[in-house]
Image (cartoon, coloured by chain):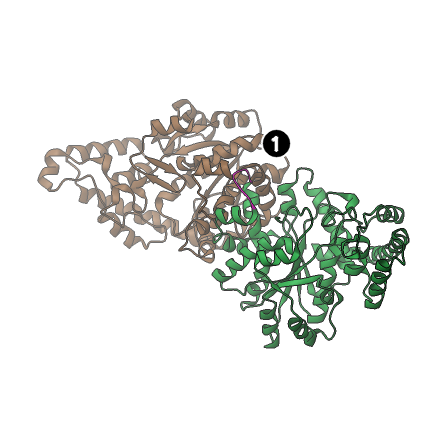
Amino acid sequence: MTPWAVKGEIDYEGLMERFGAEPITPRLLERIKRHTGGLHYMLLRGVFYSHRDLDAVLDHRERGGRFVLYTGRGPAGPVHLGHLVPWTFTKHLQEAFGSKLFFQFTDDERLLIRDDVDEGLAGHWVLENAMDVMALGFDPENTEFIVNTRHASRLYPLALKIARGITCSTMRGAFGLGDESSLGKMFFPAMQAAPCFLASERAGEPVPCLVPAGIDQDPYWRITRDAARRLGYPKPAQVHGRMLPGLTGDAKMSSSQPLTAVYTTDVPELVERKIAEADTGDHPSRCPVYQIRYMLLTEDDDEAQELYADCLAGGMECSECKARLAETVNSFLRRHRRRRSLIRSGVEKMLE
Amino acid sequence: MVVTPWEVSGDIDYGKLIEQFGVQPMTQSLADRIAGHAGYIHMQLRRGVYISHRDTDWWLGEYEKGNKVGLYTGRGPSGHVHLGHLLPWFFCKYLQDAFDADLYFQMTDDEKYLFNDHLELEQTIGYTYDNALDVIACGLDPEKTHIFSDTEHIQHLYKIGLKVAKRVTYSTAKAVFGFRDSDNIGMIWYPALQAMTCFLQSDREGANIPCLIPAAIDQDPYWRMTRDIAEKLGYYKPAQIHAKFLPGLAEGGKMSASQPETAIFTTDPPDVAAGKVMSAFTGGRDTVEEQRRLGGRPEVCNVYAYYYFLFEDDDTALREREAACRSGALLCGECKKQLAERVKAFLVDFQAKREKAKEVLDDFLIKPVE
């Protein structure tokens, strides 16, 4: 499992152990609750279940310090529901902690690894995807988009400082890169790591950075944590999320397999068809139709609980459940697209 | 003999190097052809500074067909500039004037930082601007000279750098530059940035413009790598004209092992520089009597090297000086005194230009494409 391909059933607990991350314990949840009032459903439900150094970020916060958030996206296509899971949680964190968000578009990486993506296409998806991000309700005043090719100067000096401490053998170990990898691919992780330290660099004092991301991205943060030590910046902290399973029984919704995912751009009929054809599995915990509700769309605990019980009791047929989900998804997407269309010019300005 | 962009050691056998690198030896007719366009033959062409080339004849041919041509050179800003560094820049100025060519001048402050653990990035960036004053003082045209810092101007460079970086594999870089797995990932990336400048003018102007790189021959591995991918990216292969090493003018060069202060920096107070000349290593003999009898050895003399490459433009005067040295008529003390005067006069003038350069620095820095 590397940041480029997630295949097969994912053993999330195993990954956490293998990567040496910590579980989000009930005690840590209590501590978060003291800051945020209530607990976000994604924390309660264990969608975000693992972390590194989240307690250190809270320590800093409790001493009166601020911290920033950082996440991102490789802009090579439309956004699907799976992308919205970590972003929805990130938006909650921004609101709850008043934190600045750095959102990185790794169009450089897309150009490096894909032959079918050129500058124009990447630029198109940057704008489209950024509208999806902002439609979730992020605070424009407190959100900084970094488009790597466009804003390279914000990152390159930091990336150099990070790169000087990472050897090629580390890249072999962490990313499975090797002799046939391009020079760009070898260097890129330094560009992805740089925003972790941007706030500290700009402020001239330690500003911790919290990265909500899929656990598959963990190798980046491991090398970044090593770099932090050398540079004297706070190690970036992470909260790791589970990935929304694909509709066809795959471990996650995947942009490279359109039928596994519902895109924010899918028309209602297509949404209905994709969901109708979904592979429901034998139990809600393995059913993408249930997981889309549980992990993302159904915030109400009673409602989620009821569905779960109904399913197990045989009180609801899969076809009925699918039809209802399609309705929920379509009404969500209608609202999402409406918000999206209203913010275009503001987002364009943010991307300049 | 070891020649890579980071290491030059042993006795340099240029014949072997030309063969090993697969380049063409410099010829009189090529020098004459350049001189024909310039209106005069540059001292460096007369004195054999340029020993080999690749496709310089093609580059000239493009110019002669009426096509626009460009120039690219650079500097690793890890310290102050000494007189030896100025040679290729004077030559660039000559070529710029002769061919009405834009010069892209790359300050590789990222490279110096990535390859030298004792340097901080802020230091190398600082030297970029300090060294840029020296470049400007060489008399380049502000309208046609584009100096850039890899780090501070990455905005103009990154996209095209990515195109190069996508098409060169780690194994190729290892074969060309001798990288190892223990090297850092910035070092691995850097060749893409040095290569991209070959295409920068073409990219900015949206037209394919032949690029000639006057540089020391140790930089050749970069251009071999670049030439391999140029056509895949839709650009011309860059042409090169290779300078030989001039250790006599450099810091700690091989002629100067016993004389650490051989290098004369452009920022040296003229009197200090004169003092360095007076204590320079020469090809003189142990005693005056011996020198009168046996004569001096200009071929191993740092002082003669300064005359040869920088301070005696007149071929006849140079020949006379050489003859007087070899015959024992001209002693080192006198010869040094004359050089010290010239160095002093040169520095007074150059430093005045360097001061003026501070006011026009911005005019010389790369600008966004309009």
Horizontally, is B246 left or right of A328 in the view?
left
Nearest to the observer: residue B135 or residue B113: B113
Quadrant location of the C terminus of chain A? Answer: bottom right
Asked whether residue B63 is drawn in magenta, I would say no
Nearest to the observer: residue A75 or residue B18: A75
Looking at this view, name the residue that lies furthest to the left.
B289
Q: Percent from the top left, x then y, of residue A60?
A: 58, 73
The stretch in magenta equals A176-181
Colour chosen for chain B: brown
Q: Percent from the top left, x then y, of residue B296?
A: 17, 36
Q: Quadrant of residue B49?
A: top left
What's the residue at 68%, 40% (across, down)? A118
Q: In which quarter of the image is residue A36?
A: bottom right
Look at the picture and state if A59 lies above or below B265.
Answer: below
Colour chosen for chain A: green
Looking at this view, name the residue that lies furthest to the front.
A313
Horizontally, is B303 left or right of A141 in the view?
left
What's the residue at 35%, 51% (across, down)? B348
Asked whether residue A177 is drawn in magenta, I would say yes
Horizontally, is A10 left or right of B50 in the view?
right
Q: Main secondary structure of the magenta part?
A: loop
Q: Name the residue under label 1.
A: B234
Q: Which amino acid does label 1 sit on?
A: Gly
Callout 1: chain: B
Nearest to the observer: residue A325 or residue B235: A325
Q: Can residue B16 be seen in this view?
A: yes
Q: Percent from the top left, x then y, of residue A309?
A: 84, 62
